Image (cartoon, rainbow, N blue to C red):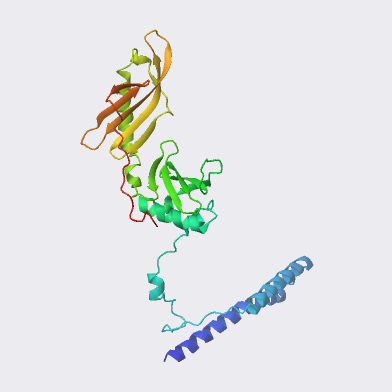
Amino acid sequence: MNSNSDAVQRKRKLIAIALLILAPYIAILYIAIKKPFKKKVNTITIVISAIYSIFLIIYLASGKTTPAVDSEPTASSSSPQISEHAQSQEPPVVSPSAMFKAITSQIITENFSDACKQIGIDVTKVNSMKLEEENAWTGGPSYSFKYEGEEFYFYCDDDLSIDSITLGYINNVKLYLKGFEPLQVSDYLPDLDVTIELDIMAEQVVKRQLNYPKTAKFSVFGWNCKRYGDIYVISNTVTAENAFGVEEDIFFFVQYDVSGSSYELVYFVMDGVAIVGEESAIPENLRAVSENANN
């Protein structure tokens, strides 16, 4: 039953194609008999017919045919099936070596990735990696990179193992230090909302120590925030009139303990003089020796 239906459909399609091919020529012949062409019109008609014939020949030569419609899908006409293995495959993982183009050694790349894992750094978010050629380091090569908006450095030994990964060049917080237990980077990345609140609080604290607080102008780009666990350090420079009415630049920094429900000012130094607290509240990074210290 299906084969008879397919044969009828194919015959109808062949008749339709034949009529499509012959229709222009039949129309031209009819017009020529009923109304003789003028020379110009006759030439244009011949050109159009020739162009139509050329396109028709190209179309037929290209082998394009109307596909037969099957009443039931076959294995060859069904949509491609994705294998269970292909469906279960995870998306390709970008090789660290592709991300760290500045690192020319695969050994360094692997050691760096392992060290980052220990301190909680997601290597896929590391960017701006570059070789520090002028950095004074007696061991192997050293590099800088950025992570979560902060600048980091890491230093290699002669055997290309990682000696340390530090947060900031000046602060030199060694999150990773060979032979010691690693520190977690999440404890040293400042929280933006907390930082904004502490900036405002620091301004008020500083203004209370000025002779003419209304003249205070804080450096817009001078605000700096560092975090050491629960201790946040806010620093900047303020320009204000002193007791003699002369403007002067005064550097200050404040330390807040954010471990509780409220922020507690624990240390405040202004123009080199301690106003609040007797010593810095920044904890020392006392870490136990790693079990793998000798590896």
The picture places residue 118, in percent across and down from the top left corner, at 36, 53
Q: Find residue 27 and report its image quarter.
A: bottom right
**Horizontal side, residue 295 vs residue 13: left or right:** left
Q: Find residue 258 and report its image quarter.
A: top left
Q: Nearer the viewer, residue 226 or 138?
A: 138
The picture places residue 260, in percent across and down from the top left corner, at 21, 36
Q: Is residue 20 among what the camera can see?
A: yes
Residue drawn at point x = 47 percent, y = 60 percent: 95
Residue drawn at point x = 42 percent, y = 10 percent: 246
The picture places residue 42, in percent across and down from the top left corner, at 75, 70
The picture places residue 66, in percent across and down from the top left corner, at 54, 79
Q: Residue at the far top: name it.
A: 244
Q: Nearer the viewer, residue 146 or 107?
A: 107
- Can you say which quadrant of the picture contains the N terminus? bottom left
Q: Nearer the viewer, residue 29 or 59?
A: 59
Q: Residue at the far right: name it.
A: 39
Q: Nearer the viewer, residue 53 or 101?
A: 101
Where 125 sits versus 84, above or below? Answer: above
**Horizontal side, residue 107 vs residue 41: left or right:** left
Where 92 sits versus 156, above or below? Answer: below
- Can you say which quadrant of the picture contains the C terminus? bottom left
Q: Residue at the far left: name it.
A: 261
